[in-house]
Amino acid sequence: MNKCYEYQTSIGHFYIVKHEGRYHAVYTGISIWSCARPDEVAAVLGYGYKFNHLGAEISEIDTSNLGIPTDLSDWTHCYFMPFNIRGNFLHNSWT
């Protein structure tokens, strides 16, 4: 189980999860990208990151208009556990 950061937006939760030495931006259980430090992930998500999300149809999500804070102190601490080698994650309850 890995420590992580969590922030709820109008379209769901975003997480910053440390896995295999990198910090991953996770949305709907899928790692959308990673970098070396958690504050870098928060900054990129807060200032704006565009990615495609598979659902009923493919749609582009732009995080710049979701109110995600760039400062990690505004995120909530949580725990995550990876469940396969593809970078997908399973959220665990708080402890």
Image (cartoon, rainbow, N blue to C red):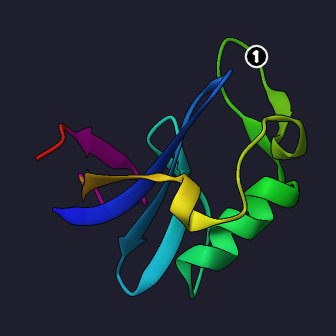
Q: Is residue 90 magenta?
A: yes
Task: Judge by depth and name the residue closer to the eye, 56 or 36.
Answer: 36
| Outermost front residue | 73
- Circle 1 residues within 10 Å: few <14, some 14–19, many ≥20: few
The residue lying toward the viewer, choosing from 36 and 8, is 8
Asked if the magenta segment contains residue 94, the reply would be no
Q: Residue drawn at (64%, 20%), measured in percent from left and top?
A: 55
Number of marks drawn: 1
Q: Magenta residues, as a range?
A: 83-92
Q: Where residue 87 sits in the image (x, y, percent)? A: 42, 60
Q: Quadrant of residue 37?
A: bottom right
Amino acid beneath label 1: Glu
Find residue 91 and report its horizontal and vertical position in percent: 29, 41
Please tell me which residue lies in front, 80 or 59: 80
- State which quadrant residue 1 falls in: bottom left
**Relative side of 61 to 69, left or right:** right
- In the picture as drawn, the residue positioned furthest to the top comes out as 56
The answer to which of 23 and 30 lies nearer the viewer is 23
Residue 28 position (above or below residue 23) = above
Q: Which residue is mark 1?
A: 57
- The secondary structure making up most of the magenta span is loop
Q: Element at badge 1?
A: loop
Which image quadrant is residue 53 in?
top right
Give me the residue at 47% from left, 82% from top.
Answer: 22
Q: Position of residue 63 (x, y in %)?
A: 81, 43
**Depicted 11 relative to depicted 43: above or below:** above
- The residue located at (78%, 66%) in the rendering is 44
Which residue is at a point 28% across and 43% down the rendered structure image? 90
Q: Is residue 90 left or right of residue 5?
A: left
